[in-house]
């Protein structure tokens, strides 16, 4: 299955952030929406990812002053991205190798979706459950 198929039919807009926003504002959005990361956009293009990890690392380095910095100073950049045609298992492998939990989905330089490792793992578990049920049915009818 491809990422395009996974994100097809999603009607909720992806929450994003501007690199000029304060870290304090971005943290408030993460907490309010109970999410772990925001893609950072400039003119529709992904310039980075702002995540809980970024905050923790910079908080350890800079102390509480990090809250008054901009997202652009704290975010992970450049962002690792995937194309819609990327296979789910390929994306999972990329996330594992790079130790990341979120991937912007990009087509022609513009973000069209955003997936988390939870989205991909859930898809894989559902796929395995379906395959297991198909095998169980086959064995019972054989």
Image (cartoon, rainbow, N blue to C red):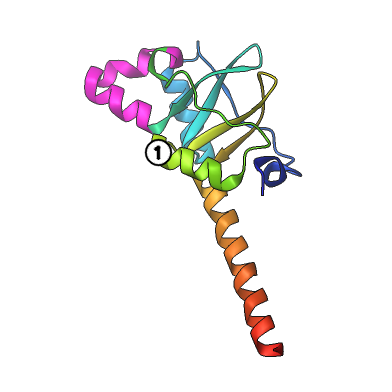
Q: Residue furthest front?
A: 142
Q: Nearer the viewer, residue 96 or 102?
A: 96
Q: Position of residue 127 (x, y in %)?
A: 62, 61
Residue 10 vertical placement versus 50 (above, below): below
Q: Position of residue 93 (x, y in %)?
A: 47, 43
Give the quadrant of residue 5.
top right
Q: Relative to 22, is 139 on the left or the right?
A: right
Q: Relative to 53, is 45 on the left or the right?
A: right
Q: Element under label 1?
A: helix
Q: Main secondary structure of the magenta part?
A: helix
* Magenta stretch: includes residue 67: yes
Q: Which residues are magenta?
A: 53-72
Q: Position of residue 102 (x, y in %)?
A: 50, 36
Q: Position of residue 39 (x, y in %)?
A: 54, 26
Q: Nearer the viewer, residue 102 or 95?
A: 95
The residue at 43%/36% (across/down) is 100
Q: Which residue in the protein does label 1 denote?
A: 97
Mark 1, other Cα within 10 Å: few <14 / some 14–19 / many ≥20: few
């Amino acid at each position: 299955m491809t990422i395009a198929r996974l994100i097809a039919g999603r009607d909720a807009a992806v929450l994003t952030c501007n690199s000029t926003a304060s870290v304090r504002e971005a943290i408030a959005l993460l907490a309010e929406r109970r999410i772990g990361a925001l893609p950072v956009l400039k003119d529709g293009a992904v310039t980075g990812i702002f995540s809980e990890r970024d905050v923790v690392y910079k908080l350890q380095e800079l102390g509480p002053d990090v809250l008054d910095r901009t997202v652009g100073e704290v975010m992970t950049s450049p962002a690792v991205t995937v194309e819609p045609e990327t296979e789910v298992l390929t994306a999972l492998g990329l996330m594992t190798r790079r130790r990341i939990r979120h991937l912007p989905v990009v087509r022609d330089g513009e973000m069209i979706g955003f997936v988390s490792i939870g989205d991909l793992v859930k898809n894989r578990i559902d796929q395995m459950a379906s395959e297991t049920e198909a095998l169980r049915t086959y064995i019972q009818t054989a």
